[in-house]
Structures are given as structure tokens and as C-alpha cells.
Amino acid sequence: MAAPRLRPCVGRLLEMPLALGCANRVYSTSQDFAEVLRMPRKQLMKLVFPLQELERHLVADSRSDLHQKIFEPSLEDILRAESFFTASARNRIEYLSSAERLDHAPDLRLPEGHTKKMNFFKVGKYFTLVDMPGYGYRAPEDFVDMVETYLKERRNLMRTFLLVDSVVGIQKTDNIAIEMCEEFALPYVMVLTKIDKSSKGHLLKQVLQIQKFVDTKTQGCFPQLFPVSAVTYSGIHLLKCFIANITGNLKTNSFQIQKSSCQLELNT
């Protein structure tokens, strides 16, 4: 993903490549969370809960700024969530179709979460992920008609995920997506990508700046950020658990869906 643009999508996150070695970072070498659970405890927690790792470097009075305990499922919850994202004969994960306009979109009753087209991926019988075009200079010419109409009129939309490059933070073009979600009163989540690309100090600075923006400049954004890496798989398991939870497919003891604060597409 190009640095100066933001992509409101989650489909790519679920297809991220597995990690390959680099001695000074923690990696998940498999999407199988059962294997991840066999890692040493410190490495496991760093991989699954990257915000907790960053929090350790803050002074005590500032630790609550990251809101990292709003969604804090148990490892058992995360393990259960993996089953929704594991393809099998009984749980097919498949590409459905592409659409350039809302009237081209498939008539789905599954939850949709948020590239020249909107690409629809069915995740078993549970929900549908929609990979949408990015903002900025590479956006398709009919971007406004395509994306704005979809976000405004799609009735079974549960949640929009805005992918922000954590190396550069929120850019001017990112505000297009944020303002759109705020204007349409769409509940959304900020997913911070490429967290393996920065030093810990730079990443912490960017995360705190983005968190402050969410706290002071937004109303519909979920207060907890989700930092992830496609290289190390850090944060991905937690994000998948969050998706399983907000679509109503997984109940956790630590977090309950508030109907007023979440809108992926639901079965009715």
C-alpha cells in the first residue's frame, strides 16, 4: 500500500503473507494459533497484543492513553476466533464477485466489513469482507460514486476498517475517509499497518499522535487502535478475534457489542 493513501478494507489483512526470519523481531510462522500458543510467553504476548508491548515504554500516568484494554479477549477467545478464518470443507472462504457500483454488488445477507473495484469475499456462513479501492492519487476515477454510495446506502454494513500507514501517520488524504465515515455516522476502526517498518520509538510516537486524533477529532471511531504487521503477523490474531466478535459470531467475557457503536454485512 502506498504511503500517502488510506484503504478502507480488511480482505487483504486476512490474506497476509506469513513471516520469514529476522533475528531481532518476533514472528508468527503460521496462521495456526495453536502453534502460536506454544511460543515463549513474552514473545506470545508481544505478537498477539502489540499495544501492550508499546505501553510498557510509557510512564505510568500515560498508559491509559492507548485504551488497549477496551477489547482484551483471552487467548482462549482468540483461539476460538481462528476457526472462522480457517478454510475447510465446512467453512469455505471464497471470492464472490467484484463491483464498480452499489447496484453491481451481490445481494448478500452476511456481514461485510471493510483495487479498482469493490471485491467481495465470503467467509463461511458468517460474514462477507469487502476489499475497497484506496484513496489518493491511485483512486479510480469513479471513486466517489463507487465508495461513497456503498458506505452510505449499504444496509447490512457492520463496520468499516480504515488502514493507516503507521510509518507516516494520518495524512491529508486519510481525512477523506475519516470525514466520510463521520459525515455518514458510520462506526469505524483504525488499523495501523506496517508496524514492523519503524523503530519502537517512532512507532510509539505515531501511535500516540493517532490515538490523540481519535480521542479529540472523531466521534464514530472505535477508541482502541489495532496495530498490525503483514510481515510478522503481529496484531493480526487480535484483529480477527475483534471481527468475529463484532459480527456476533464470538462472545467474549471482556467485551460486549454495543448496537449503537458498531455497524462488516449481517445475516437477517
Image (cartoon, rainbow, N blue to C red):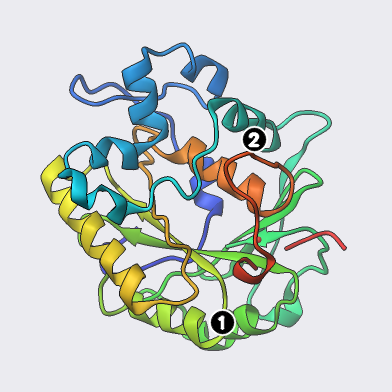
User: Circle 1 sits on which residue?
Assistant: 185
**Residue 217 position by quadrant:** bottom left
- Determine whether 205 is above or below 40 in the image: below
Quick one: label 2, few (<14), some, or many (20+) residues within 10 Å? Answer: many
Q: Residue at x 34, y 36 (%)?
A: 231
User: Circle 2 sits on which residue?
Assistant: 81
Q: Residue at x 83, y 63 (%)?
A: 109
Q: Quadrant of the N terminus?
A: bottom left
The furthest residue to the front: 61
Q: Residue at x 20, y 50 (%)?
A: 61
- Determine whether 184 is above or below 161 in the image: below
Q: Position of residue 110 (x, y in %)?
A: 78, 58
Q: Quadrant of the C terminus?
A: bottom right
Name the N-terminal-most of marks 1 and 2. Answer: 2
| Front residue of 233 and 226 | 226
Q: Are marks 1 and 2 in contact (CB under 8 Å)?
A: no
Tell me which amino acid carries mark 1: Ala
Classify mark 2: helix, strand or loop: helix
- Determine whether 159 is above or below 31 in the image: below
Tell me which amino acid carries mark 2: Ala
Q: Is residue 193 left or right of residue 131?
A: left
Quick one: label 1, few (<14), some, or many (20+) residues within 10 Å? Answer: some
